[in-house]
Image: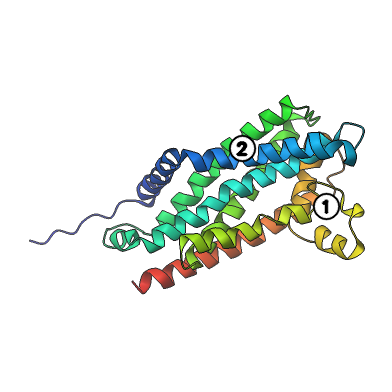
Amino acid sequence: MITQTKKPSLLVTGSVFIGRSLLHSLRNVDALIMAIVLPIILMLMFTYVFGGAIDPSGQYVNYVVPGIILLCAGFGSSSTAFDVATDMTNGIIDRFRTMPIRSMNVITGHVVASLARNLLATGVVIIIALLVGFRPTGSIFEWFAAVGVIALFILTITWLFAAIGLVASSPAAASGYGFVILFLPYLSSAFVPTITMPKWLQGVAENQPITPIIETIRSLLVGGEVANQIWWAIGWCFLILIASIIWATWTFKMKAGRR
């Protein structure tokens, strides 16, 4: 008599792939350390080297930290593109497809593990920021709201990097494509107010996704009028998140189906 293998639940397979990705993160300690160290170096450089020239009042650290938080998320999430591209090119997806599991969970595992990893890295960056003079004034509710926006941004950009890793021809190419996205915070209000930029650049800086996210976090943590910024921030995140999930799912099915 032929017995049919029972297919494990999505919860079980999902937890296995998340554990696999977290284990890879623990083994690749260098990447995790660099994802934390690079934003901290940038924060120290902008605070102590450029801060006096940009804001002689000594309060520049309060302005720059929200941008550094998003940089930290970007650096940490960018490794997802490399990890996904590696899985797609080393043949392991073929092995997963022979098992009674939903192989797309391997991508979900990378995304959830990246979210956990980058929330931890963000916490470390905030602690260092407090040590160098960051003085947030937000209430507990505002802190929860800020963390929610940060988590949504990390989830969004991680799915975007996952989609990039799927379309890239190699892990090296995935890293290169992802690196371009990391320049977006520099063309926003992360380090200087957009009003100080040339007129033609102001339009780019004020109407790209990163600026309302940074302004929302900044207003929640150090005071200011959130106004419509939070809705623009959430709207941009959900738009990119949905597009990235659809893109990643379609690309995975196309690539995995051809194997």
Find residue 48 and report its horizontal and vertical position in percent.
80, 33
Find residue 226 and report its horizontal and vertical position in percent.
83, 45
Find residue 169 and report its horizontal and vertical position in percent.
47, 68
Q: Is residue 53 visible?
A: yes
Which residue does the numbered mark 1 point to in the structure image? Answer: 228
Mark 1 neighbour class, 10 Å CA radius: few under 14, some 14 to 19, many 20 or more: few
**Residue in front for this viewpoint, 233 or 85:** 85
Residue shown at 33%/58% (left/top)?
Answer: 92
As drawn, 113 above or below 161: above
Alpha carbon distance from label 1 to label 2: 33 Å
Find residue 38 and report its horizontal and vertical position in percent.
63, 41
User: Quarter holding the N terminus?
Assistant: bottom left
Residue 246 position by quadrant: bottom right
Q: Is residue 231 visible?
A: no
Mark 2 neighbour class, 10 Å CA radius: few under 14, some 14 to 19, many 20 or more: some
As drawn, 248 above or below 183: below
> Residue 37 shows which numbered tag?
2
